[in-house]
Image (cartoon, helix red, strand yellow):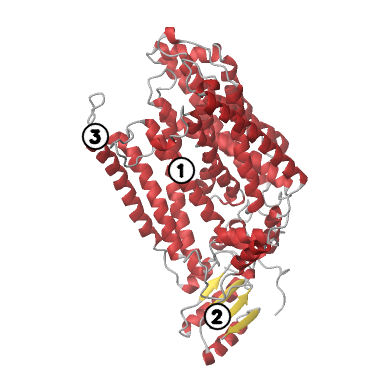
């Protein structure tokens, strides 16, 4: 029998079988796809090692800062009355928000049959898992006694005490732990068929071992694909309402409180849109680096990036609308405190933070209306960095300005200053996230081989149709 | 850095997996329609217990095998129902076991418990979905019940028919007739 490796075949005409091939060039074959993606797992270069060592150094500084805080107390974080929640809570909300993109890309776009997700969803899912792992640290770091986080969980104890299930903070415990569990399951299940490719094609015995472990012995049998995709649909069906609920619950940490600037029904959709906005921006940054660094421009194409940047544009308009809506409600509503708070937010002590937020999240993304910007990787990369700076400041502004300007003028105060401990831990959160991401792209396929393969025309001897 | 030999031997042992003896015929195909034709022929001759290994799922093959829907959804539904019931029960039990009226509100105030019930439903539904899928796909599969070729995760499709004797010879001929690149008899 002739070797069919270089065979050319007529693309099958049945759209159900073929999927959409427009995003992957015709030069990509099943074999070349395996080789291109597994090439990422080969021996790391100097740039990877340099970035990894820098990352570990920042993380080490953050660990020193955390030790300082544990030994000397939470006071070293710079939190001063009335601002007792500051960058740690902002970091928590920021990283949970970052995590939202993964589920959007992997679950919601899966349910909508958006085929462009196939080349990009693994990076987004990894970002989700590592983002939640980073977010989950901050409530613990923010605890006065960080060795007691288990008190948050309901467990039978001698005193017969249970957590207060009416508290939004307890809802958060349930929402974030569920999100971490479900997104990790979704991530690991998605890797199974690709880990089997890694196991079968690895040149290194340790990469083969990782493939063996993460593939769970997957063989790609018909009985396996049937139940795998049966279950995958339900993971997506669960993850979609979950992603909407998690950031809604996070927003209720604020909205349920009687604080000017927080007590608003708009918070849940506003937070969800903001989360997707920042998450998609970061995934674009990561994809631009990966496709350039590993020469995967033919698999993660400009079309993919452009489609993601349209999502950024959409969510930016929702976020912008929410800002204006908040202002309108404060101006039109009956509460003088609310009106004063919003005026102070943009003209008071933290005016600079509010304007960074507004310009980065509303004004700069307007450039995405231009196709030339959406398809220019350098401009897009810089723009997405600004979006994430803006989104971090959004959380900072919501938390700090509202706490610094509550109902009672006697309590107004701007004594809060970010301490070096707090700044180091903020930088360390990026290093913590980066460490997992850098390791991930070295040990497991960062782009879904099986799903991209599904977009290729299946080899058919006869013309289909 | 060179790791000690016992560790390397252990890694190689895990990678190699257990040795298993098989009985049947394994065909390696390239074209999807060749496989579907072969599957249909085999099923017409009464050999219905066939397995197809492929790098991606193909609807044509599913149709040839007359595969129904996965039953994993029922396991998932069970988990989700257990989750929502458990979530509400936990909240209600906690306020009844330590009755403490706060702000004059009802002890059993269902609206705030919806969040806990909802998140528990998703958590247990997803876990049930995972365990249901693992059980039905027979994962983790350490000892395989059919031979496997690494090319099946690349670009080739495998067709395994458990059979022996005269029947195996006929199956081999049939596979070759349907365009198999390689046919191997395991006896």
Foreground mark, 2 or 1, reads 2
Q: Residue at left 46%, top 23%?
A: A325
Q: Work out which quarter of the rendered image holds the N terminus of chain A and state it.
A: bottom right
Of circles 1 and 3, the one toward us is: 3
Residue B97 at what x, y percent from top left?
23, 38
Task: Name the spot of residue B94 as percent of width and height, x first.
Answer: 27, 38
Q: Residue B179: image x %, image y %?
A: 63, 79
Above or below, A154 against B170 in this view is: above
What label does residue B98 carry, if any?
3
- Residue B6, how many percent across, how many down? 64, 64
**Considering the numbered disc 3 on the image, is that residue within a helix, a strand or a loop?**
loop
Report the chain holding disc 3.
Answer: B
Mark nearer the N terminus (3 vs 2): 2
Q: Is residue A135 left or right of residue A266?
A: right
Callout 1: SS: helix
Query: In front: mark 3 or mark 2?
Result: 3
Q: Is label 1 on the same chain as label 3?
A: no
Residue A125 visible at all: yes
Residue found at x 43% / y 65%: B136
Q: Identify the residue under disc 1.
A: A179
Instruction: Return the chain for callout 2.
Output: B
| Residue A362 appearing in the image | no
Residue beneath disc 2: B21
Q: Is A102 situated above or below B155?
A: above
Check the residue under mark 1 and report the chain it is in: A
Number of callouts: 3
Q: How many other residues sit within 10 Å of disc 1, few (<14), some (14-19) or many (≥20)?
A: many
């Amino acid at each position: 029998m002739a070797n069919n490796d270089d065979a050319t075949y007529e693309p099958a005409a049945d759209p159900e079988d073929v999927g959409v091939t427009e995003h992957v060039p015709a030069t990509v074959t099943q074999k070349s796809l395996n080789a291109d993606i597994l090439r990422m797992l080969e021996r790391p270069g100097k740039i990877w090692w340099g970035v990894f060592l820098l990352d570990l150094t920042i993380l080490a500084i953050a660990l020193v800062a955390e030790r300082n805080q544990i030994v000397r107390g939470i006071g070293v974080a710079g939190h001063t009355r009335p601002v007792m929640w500051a960058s740690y809570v902002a970091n928590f909300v920021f990283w949970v928000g970052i995590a939202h993109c993964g589920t959007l890309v992997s679950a919601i776009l899966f349910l909508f049959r958006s085929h462009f997700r196939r080349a990009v969803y693994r990076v987004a899912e990894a970002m989700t898992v590592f983002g939640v792992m980073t977010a989950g640290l901050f409530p613990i770091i923010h605890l006065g006694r960080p060795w007691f986080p288990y008190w948050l969980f309901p467990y039978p104890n001698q005193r017969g005490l249970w957590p207060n299930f009416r508290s939004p903070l307890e809802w958060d415990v349930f929402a974030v732990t569920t999100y971490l569990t479900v997104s990790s399951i979704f991530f690991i299940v998605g890797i199974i068929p690709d880990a089997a490719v890694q196991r079968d094609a690895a040149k290194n015995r340790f990469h083969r071992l990782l493939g063996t472990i993460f593939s769970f012995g997957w063989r790609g049998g018909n009985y396996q694909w049937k139940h795998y995709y049966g279950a995958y649909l339900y993971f997506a069906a669960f993850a979609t309402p979950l992603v909407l609920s998690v950031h809604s619950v996070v927003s209720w940490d604020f909205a349920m409180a009687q604080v000017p600037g927080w007590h608003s029904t708009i918070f849940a959709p506003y937070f969800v849109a903001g989360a997707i906005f920042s998450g998609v921006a970061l995934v674009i940054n990561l994809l631009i680096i990966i496709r350039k660094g590993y020469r995967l421009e033919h698999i993660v194409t400009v079309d993919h990036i452009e489609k993601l940047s349209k999502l950024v544009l959409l969510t930016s308009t929702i976020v912008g609308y929410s800002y204006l809506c908040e202002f309108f409600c404060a101006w039109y509503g009956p509460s003088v405190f609310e009106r004063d708070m919003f005026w102070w937010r943009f003209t008071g002590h933290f005016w600079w933070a509010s304007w960074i937020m507004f310009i980065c999240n509303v004004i700069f993304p307007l450039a995405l209306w231009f196709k030339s910007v959406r398809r220019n990787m350098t401009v897009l990369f810089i723009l997405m960095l600004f979006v994430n700076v803006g989104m971090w400041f959004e959380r900072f502004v919501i938390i700090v300005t509202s706490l610094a300007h509550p109902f009672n003028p006697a309590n107004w105060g701007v004594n809060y200053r970010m301490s070096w401990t707090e700044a180091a831990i903020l930088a360390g959160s990026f290093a913590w996230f980066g460490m997992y991401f850098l390791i991930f792209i070295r040990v497991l396929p960062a782009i879904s081989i099986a799903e991209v393969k599904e977009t290729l025309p299946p080899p058919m001897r006869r013309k289909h149709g | 850095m060179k790791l000690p030999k016992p560790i390397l031997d252990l890694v190689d042992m895990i990678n190699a997996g257990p040795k298993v003896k098989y009985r049947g015929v394994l065909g390696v195909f390239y074209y999807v329609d060749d496989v579907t034709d072969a599957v249909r022929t085999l099923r017409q001759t009464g050999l219905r217990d066939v397995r197809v290994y492929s790098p991606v799922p193909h609807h044509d093959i599913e149709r040839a095998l007359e595969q129904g829907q996965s039953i994993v959804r029922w396991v998932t539904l069970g988990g989700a129902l257990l989750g929502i019931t458990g979530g509400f029960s936990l909240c209600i039990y906690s306020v009844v076991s330590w009755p403490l009226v706060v702000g004059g509100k009802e002890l059993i105030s269902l609206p705030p418990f919806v969040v806990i019930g909802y998140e528990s439903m998703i958590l247990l539904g997803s876990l049930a979905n995972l365990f249901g899928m693992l059980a039905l796909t027979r994962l983790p599969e350490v000892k395989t019940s059919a031979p496997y070729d690494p090319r099946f995760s690349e670009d080739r499709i495998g067709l395994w028919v458990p059979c022996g004797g005269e029947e195996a010879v006929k199956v081999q001929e049939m596979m070759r007739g349907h365009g198999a690149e390689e046919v191997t008899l395991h006896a």
